[in-house]
Image: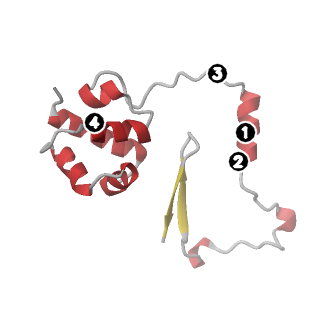
Amino acid sequence: MVNSAEFAKRLQKILDYYGISATAFSEEIEVNRSTISHLLSGRNKPSLDFVLKVIDHYPEVELYWLLNGKGSFPPVSSKPEIEQSDVQNKTEARLPFIPSEENSEENPTLPIKDSEIDRIVIFYKDGRFKSYKN
C-alpha cells in the first residue's frame, strides 16, 4: 500500500530534480494540475494511470522507488567509462561559436549593462534543455 505522505516527498523530489513546477509537470504528463496538488499535499493516493504516465515520461524514475521508496533516485549511472578523447570531441562539437579577438571589430559585443535578457537556456547533462523566454 502506498503511503501518501511519503509518495508526496518522492514526487517533490522528482520535481526538484528536473527543476520543473507542478504545473509544468502536470502538462508534461497530461494530468490535471489539481491531481498534482492533491498528491503533493498527501490528500490523494496516486492512480495506476498517473504512475504509468510518470514512468513513461521520465524513464529515470524507477517504479519501485516511486511507489514505495525502494531503490534510488536519481539512479546511479551504470554507463560504461568513456575515453577522455571522446568526451573532448563531443564537447567541442557542442561549443558555441565565440568570435576571436581578430574579428571582434567585425562582431562587437554589447555591454551587459545596456542589454536586456531575451532568453535563458538551461542545458542538462543528458542532452535535454529548457528555454525560458522573457
Residue beneath disc 4? 10
Q: Nearer the viewer, mark 4 or mark 3?
A: 4
Q: Secondary structure at mark 3?
A: loop
- Tell me how far mark 4 sits from mark 2, CA to CA: 33 Å
> From what the image shows, is residue 102 above or below residue 60?
below
Please, what is the three-letter code of the amino acid marked with disc 4?
Arg
| Residue for point 36% across, 40% down | 54
- Tell me how far mark 4 sits from mark 3, CA to CA: 30 Å
| Type of colouring | secondary structure
Q: Quadrant of the N terminus?
A: top left
First in sequence, mark 4 or 2: give its number: 4
- Tell me how far mark 1 sits from mark 2, CA to CA: 7 Å
| Residue for point 29% across, 41% down | 50
Do the residues under discs 1 and 2 have CB atoms within 8 angstroms?
A: yes
59 vs 4, left or right, is: right
34 vs 62, left or right, is: left
Residue beneath disc 2? 94
First in sequence, mark 4 or 3: give its number: 4
- Tell me how far mark 1 sits from mark 3, CA to CA: 15 Å
Please, what is the three-letter code of the amino acid marked with disc 3?
Glu
Q: Name the residue at the right extreme.
A: 102
Residue beneath disc 1? 90
Q: Position of residue 101 (x, y in %)?
A: 83, 63
Q: Name the residue at the left extreme.
A: 43
